[in-house]
Image: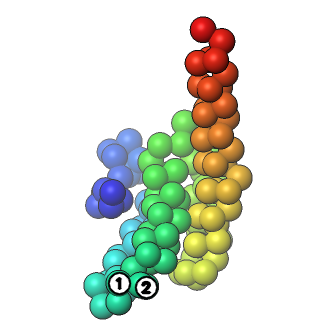
């Protein structure tokens, strides 16, 4: 799922969020352009790059607190246009935020199923 082209109205007035989201959109656009001209074998790794990029964009959209959103925006801005740094940041959120949450949810659900 591509990042939406615009932030929701409630975030459009926050310049640092707009800047960070624009960085994510530009990164996504660059990866998509590379994907069009690449061979099938390379597309798998480029899909992973898209996932890492989109993690950052969707965190800006859906993180539940303003403080969390500000922190993510600040980290994205520190990376700036440095593609590798942005992708490493996405990887960090995948490894240390998303995967643990997924595992926790899975284990809770598994526990629930075995004890009903």
Of residues 13 and 95, the one drawn nearer to the viewer in this rendering: 95
Of residues 33 and 73, the one drawn nearer to the viewer in this rendering: 33
Whether label 2 touches label 1, CB < 8 Å? yes
Q: What residue is drawn where x is 47% and y is 43%?
A: 62
Q: Spatial distance from mark 2 to mark 1, Cα to Cα? A: 5 Å
Residue 67: percent from the left, percent from the top? Answer: 63, 43
Viewer can see residue 104:
yes
Of residues 24 and 47, the one drawn nearer to the viewer in this rendering: 47
Residue 4: percent from the left, percent from the top? Answer: 31, 56
Which residue is under mark 1? 40
Q: Quadrant of residue 85?
A: bottom right
Residue 24: percent from the left, percent from the top? Answer: 45, 68
Q: Secondary structure at mark 2?
A: helix
Of residues 26 and 112, the one drawn nearer to the viewer in this rendering: 112
Q: What residue is drawn where x is 58% and y is 18%?
A: 113
Q: What residue is drawn where x is 51% and y is 57%?
A: 55
Query: In which quadrant is the N terminus drawn?
Result: bottom left
Q: Is residue 102 above or below residue 41?
A: above
Residue 66 - label:
none
- Tell me if 59 is positioned left or right of 75 in this view: left
Residue 71: percent from the left, percent from the top? Answer: 65, 53
Which residue is under mark 2? 42
Q: Is residue 77 above or below residue 83?
A: above
């Amino acid at each position: 799922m591509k990042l939406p082209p615009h932030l929701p109205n409630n975030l459009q007035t926050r310049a640092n969020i707009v800047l960070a989201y624009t960085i994510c959109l530009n990164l996504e656009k660059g990866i998509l352009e590379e994907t069009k001209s690449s061979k099938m074998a390379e597309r798998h790794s480029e899909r992973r790059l898209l996932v890492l990029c989109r993690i950052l964009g969707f965190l800006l959209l859906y993180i539940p607190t303003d403080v969390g959103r500000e922190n993510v925006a600040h980290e994205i801005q520190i990376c700036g246009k440095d593609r590798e740094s942005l992708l490493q940041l996405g990887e960090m959120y995948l490894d240390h935020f998303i995967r643990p949450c997924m595992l926790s949810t899975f284990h809770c659900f598994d526990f629930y199923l075995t004890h009903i």
